Image: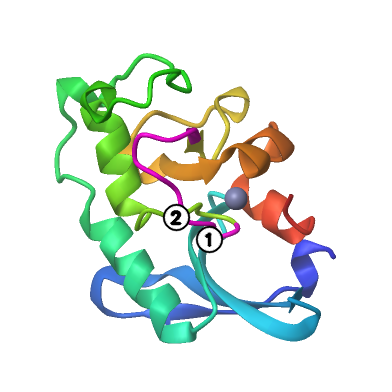
């Protein structure tokens, strides 16, 4: 499916700003049934802010995601590249991973598979570093290993439009 066939309309007001973000619906097959998934996207950045089976849930998640971003840059925004931890000890979960985990609601940003905080999941750049994506919180989401590896260097929007993992 091409991005141009995605049905989306700008969202006005509130934390979503003056139409910068769009609410998009994406037909898909879930458990053998045709369904629609909703997502809030930033078309200019090619980023997917949230994804859910319900419209309101997609909006709530996107709002939480946006509100979690601090107003001013801080030194600790510049994090080193994240490794998948080998230890399952919760003590070894870094503050960044915790923040990304909480903001993603404990689920994979793309396929919504539940993740364990101290389990194997990736801190994922929605806009990849190879496309000059940054390490700011807004660009970071939790992704399961399968989605992270199959997304590769695509932007989050390209990945979702390509059918995901
Ligand atoms: Zn996933």
Position of residue 8 relative to residue 21, above or below, is below
Name the residue carrying label 2. Answer: 107
- Where does the image place residue 53, in percent across and percent down from the top left? 54, 79
* Secondary-structure class at tag 2: loop
View extreme (right): residue = 1
Q: Magenta part of the protein: which range?
A: 111-122
Dividing the picture into quadrants, the one containing residue 140 is: top left
Task: State which tag comes first along the sequence, 1 or 2.
Answer: 2
Name the residue carrying label 1. Answer: 112
Position of residue 155 relative to residue 2, above or below, is above
Q: Work out whether residue 31 or residue 40 is closer to the camera in this orientation and state it.
A: 31
Locate the N terminus by quadrant: bottom right
Q: Is residue 115 magenta?
A: yes
Marks 1 and 2 sit apart, C-alpha to C-alpha, by 5 Å
- Where does the image place residue 155, in percent across and percent down from the top left? 63, 43
Is residue 17 visible from the viewing direction of this image?
no
- Where does the image place residue 34, in percent across and percent down from the top left? 77, 85
- Do tag 1 and tag 2 residues touch (Cβ < 8 Å)? yes
What residue is shown at x 83% (from left), y 63% (from top)?
A: 2
What residue is shown at x 15% (from left), y 45% (from top)?
A: 71
What residue is shown at x 54% (from left), y 57% (from top)?
A: 113
Tally of marks: 2
- Where does the image place residue 144, in percent across and percent down from the top left? 56, 43
Q: Work out whether residue 53 or residue 19 is closer to the camera in this orientation and state it.
A: 53
152 with respect to 61 (left or right): right
Position of residue 60 relative to residue 96, above or below, is below
Q: Is mark 1 within 8 Å of ligand 1?
A: yes
Q: Dot 2: few (<14), some (14–19), or many (≥20) neighbours within 10 Å?
A: many
Q: Is residue 61 magenta?
A: no
What residue is shown at x 65% (from left), y 44% (from top)?
A: 147
Q: Dot 1: few (<14), some (14–19), or many (≥20) neighbours within 10 Å?
A: some
């Amino acid at each position: 499916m091409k991005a141009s066939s995605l049905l989306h309309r700008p969202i006005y007001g509130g934390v979503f700003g003056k139409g910068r973000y769009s609410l998009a619906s994406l037909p898909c097959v879930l458990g053998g049934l045709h369904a629609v998934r909703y997502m809030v996207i930033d078309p200019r950045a090619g980023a997917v802010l949230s994804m859910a089976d319900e419209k309101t849930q997609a909006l709530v998640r996107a709002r939480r995601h946006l509100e979690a971003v601090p107003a001013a840059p801080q030194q600790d925004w510049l994090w080193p590249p994240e490794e998948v931890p080998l230890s399952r000890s919760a003590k070894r979960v870094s503050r960044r991973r915790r923040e990304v985990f909480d903001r993603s609601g404990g689920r994979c940003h793309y396929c919504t598979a539940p993740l364990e905080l101290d389990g194997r999941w990736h801190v994922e750049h929605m806009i990849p570093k190879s496309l000059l994506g940054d390490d700011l919180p807004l660009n970071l989401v939790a992704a399961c290993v399968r989605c992270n590896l199959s997304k590769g260097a695509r932007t989050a929007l390209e990945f979702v439009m390509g059918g995901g993992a």
